[in-house]
Image (spheres, grey):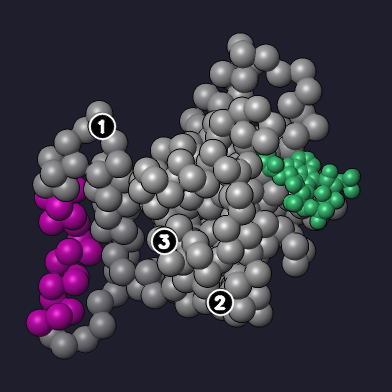
Amino acid sequence: MAFENLLITNKGRIQYITINRESKLNALNAVTLAELHTAFTGAFANPDVGGIIITGAGPKAFIAGADISEFVNLNAHTGRELAQNGHTKVFDLIANGSKPVIAAINGFALGGGLEMAMACHIRIASDNAKLGLPELTLGIIPGYGGTQRLTQLVGRGKALEMIMTSDMVTAADALQFGLVNHVVSPEELLTKAEELLNKILKRAPLAIASAITAVNAATRSDVNGFETEISEFSKCMGTHDFKEGVAAFLEKRPAEFKGE
Ligand code: COA
């Protein structure tokens, strides 16, 4: 399927989703958000895709935020719809996806761009990346999960500092306070993302999905995370992959997981 603002490429079991609006620093307009919903829904359903790397086109930006030019006519009512739809159709879809999603942050990750990176399961930044939630400069607050996910990742004090000052932080600082997992040179960014994802993809696919569900439960107030863990653990034990994993260990050979 051809998209207006996304490039989709496959490399083995990895699918790249690249935001392709370089002239607007890959800002998320309505078309791009709708395409992201379609692309991620497709990637999660496609048995040939094991995991996803999301990045931005060009050397300058991962995503410089929501497209501010589309904010002009918004009001309290349409703003609620915008945020609610964004949560459900894109950001929560990614965060709760059954396959690992890595953000390869190749430059500015601002506003909705940082919120996108934070919805992903792992973040790798190039050493020239700048990250921030500058929404307060526009008279609003982050609306795509930023207040919640930033607080979960870096703690309340640092989250409030970043959000209230609207300051950008460097990749090195982001690494130091846990906002990104790794920082590498721009040349190494995709290699590092692929290396990490390929290692994950050697593990049992259904157990990867269960790990995402159980870890995410730690960030939710509507479920008991320990109960979720017990339930996901028992689900894993009912899989063919569990039998294969144990047999492979005992037979001293690599496991061949089928996701069954
Ligand atoms: N929405 C819409 N357009 C955006 C955008 C956004 N979030 N971020 C950048 N652009 C556009 C610019 O308007 C410009 O378009 P133009 O060439 O048609 O005028 C183009 O992308 C290049 O951006 P520019 O501002 O010229 O680049 P810069 O290097 O001088 O500055 C930034 C880079 C990221 C610091 C600056 O673009 C910026 O502050 N962007 C907005 C970030 C933001 O507040 N995001 C949160 C939104 S909620």
Instruction: Bin the neighbour count of mark 3 within 10 Å (Cα to Cα): few under 14, some 14-19, many 20 and up.
Output: few
Of the residues shown, which amino acid type is indicated by label 1? Ser
Is the residue marked by circle 2 packed among few (<14), some (14-19), or many (20+) residues within 10 Å?
A: some
**Residue 235 - label:** none
Assess whether residue 162 is covered by the magenta stretch. no
Q: Where is residue 33, by image quadrant?
A: top right
The answer to whether one can see residue 234 in this image is: yes
Boundaries of the magenta span = 232-250
Cβ atoms under marks 2 and 1 closer than 8 Å: no
For the residues bearing labels 3 and 1, Cβ distance under 8 angstroms: no
Which residue matches tag 2? 184
Q: Element at badge 3? A: loop
Q: Name the residue under label 1.
A: 221
Residue at figure coordinates x 49%, y 30% from the top left: 88
Task: From the top left corner, tell me how far across and down residue 251 is, in percent.
Answer: 13, 85
Question: Could you tell me if the residues under marks 2 and 3 are in contact, i.e. CB atoms within 8 Å?
Answer: no
* Mark 3 lies on residue: 177
Relative height, residue 140 to residue 18 (above, below)? above
